[in-house]
Image (spheres, coloured by chain):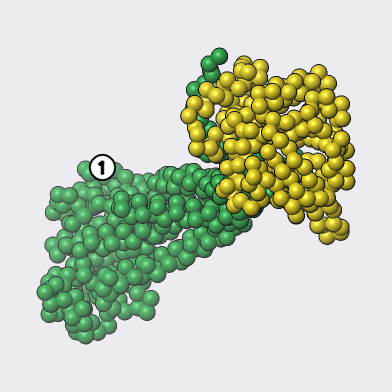
Amino acid sequence: MKSPINIKKVNSGKLITSSIRRRLFRNLATIACFAFVAGTILAAGFLVAGAQMGVQQGLDRLGADMIVIPLDPYARNAGFFMTGQPSSLYLDESVTNDVLATPGVLAVSPQAYAGTLLSVPWCQYSVHVMGFDPKTDFTIKGMVTGMPDLQANQVIVGRFVQGNVGSSIDIHGQNFTIVGRMAATGFSTDYSVFVTLEEAYRLAADSQSGMDPFPLQPGKISVVLVKADREIGIDPVLYWVTVMNPGVLVYPMSKLTWQVGDQLMVTTQTLYLTVTSVILVSLPLVALIATMGTNERRREIGLLRAMGATKSYVFRLFFTETVLLAFLGGIIGVVGASLCLAWFQETLSQSLQIAFLWPSLPVVLSQISIALMIAILLAGGAAIWPALQASKLEPYDAIRRGQN
Amino acid sequence: MIVISSITKTYVTPSCTVKALDEASAVIEDKEFVLIVGRSGSGKSTLLSVMGGLTRPSEGKVELNGRDIWKMDDSELSQVRNREIGFVFQFAGLMPTLNALENVMLPAMFSNNRTDVAKRAEELLISLGLGDKFTSYPHQLSGGELKRAAIARALLNDPGIILADEPTGDLDADTEMEIMELFREINKKGKTIIMVTHNPDLSTYATRVFRMAKGKLEIV
């Protein structure tokens, strides 16, 4: 009689997979544990790497080497770019020309925070209204394809603002036509609208009789974006701007990255603390599950040894099984975390108030490798002791105790 | 030939010391059908496991064709268990996660000779009346079928010696007789069979009978 199924041989893979299937619930729990570990590690890595990329890309798009802001120990105006936290501290408009007169300064462009629209039908978030000078601008135009010559009652919008180019939005009862949309930055510009400085002053003046008056006063600005002569070097120009313009704070863009880094630090530390906790909890848990499995399978161990399995084979069998579960869990965790991050990318960016961009492929691959590696190392660490115990069992003793 | 010389096995527990085997000695020639009878706890299963390289004795030696198996390293002893000895246990029969055919093929995993394993396993199962049970899992087999599958597995690598630990202990009288007849046939084909049982009525199948009492082995 021929075998109805094509079985040529039985191997370790068959033993492992059949064992995993037999104790499905427990093994699924173990897989879930590893999935959680790998997913958490990957999420933490992605968030940090994605935020760093977001900051870098945003800064590159701003195109400024430094910013001049009101003298303030907390440098609140600097934070506006990255975190969207508005500040009502202002400079006098004349600072723009003073800074431009500084040696080594190639270009300057002022921007003014007019105010915030807390609830508008054309954006799900609060929207910042910003004024800028189209004539001197070198930041906004870099983010808008086919930047038009901005007129009164025209507006450039960030990516979260709804409406097509050519459509209108209402700001404090006045219609503005959308004439351009900025590329995504991950910064506050994503939920900002940009009008000319003159329009910003007019809107601010008109809003004074309304419910939410804008804080901007005529002739005031929030920041001067500065482009330095790279041949001279950013640091010398920064020094001269600082020395020649007392009463203002000159903030290099590189420091802005650090500032965001500090903000990220709290988030990162929380994430890594979570990862560490997950690992510390998982290690004994997986070891316990593996030990339970070993105890339950004493009879099988005894049988395998009676049939000729060496101690090292039994060790490898049990060790590999746990590592395989870790690998499966790791893959599930990595895929799950990636999907969650992709789905909630914008929500995360908003809630954590950090710029977040999907990391580059090499970064993604390295983060995935790290997450899988840690899950497998965790499995290895947790499986060594139970696997050693399994291999050390005397065959007859294992069979007898396994029967009870 | 198996020679066991002054085998002693002592179990030390926190409360007492138990001498499971007490200076047990015997010489078992090739192609014998040896029955070791004794009451539960007399040490007969322990003796069988010492002879089969499953339990290390406290003292004494076990020689298999002139080689002391307890002086071998783990790898050598595992090869002896794989190639030269086939085991049939009372309860711990088959791997629950594998079907009958896979269970029978299992010893080939640890053997260098893996050619035609599936064919040989099929032939063994057919010869033992399990031709229609290839894909049945242990929980789908009756007591007698489980035992026959375990015997088929013990025979896969064509070992010279079959060690059977109470192989009929959990079977009804008819099935017991059927299994004992199988062992008799296997013995007639040139295999040495050493079987332990608490049932002295099975003595008729054996060429020689030993009695085990309080760890001591004596010929009947």
User: Which residue is nearer to you in this view: B143 or B153?
Assistant: B153
Of residue A248 and residue B8, the one placed in the foreground of this image is B8
A296 to the left or right of A76:
right
Q: Point out residue B88 in the picture as x, y percentages from the top left corner.
A: 70, 33
Q: Quadrant of the N terminus of chain B?
A: top right
Question: In this rendering, is residue A337 above or below B101?
Answer: below
Q: Position of residue A311 (x, y in %)?
A: 59, 49
Point out residue A132 in the picture as x, y percentages from the top left corner: 22, 62
Residue type marked 1: Asn
Chain A color in figure: green
The residue beneath circle 1 is: A164
Chain letter, yellow = B
10 Å crowding of disc 1: few (<14), some (14-19), many (20+): few
**Residue at position x 51%, y 45% from top?**
A324
Q: Quadrant of the C terminus of chain B?
A: top right
Q: Is residue A235 above or below residue A169?
A: below
Q: Position of residue A329 (x, y in %)?
A: 50, 45
Count of marks, rendered view: 1
Q: Is residue A294 visible?
A: no
User: Do we see residue B188 in this rendering?
Assistant: yes
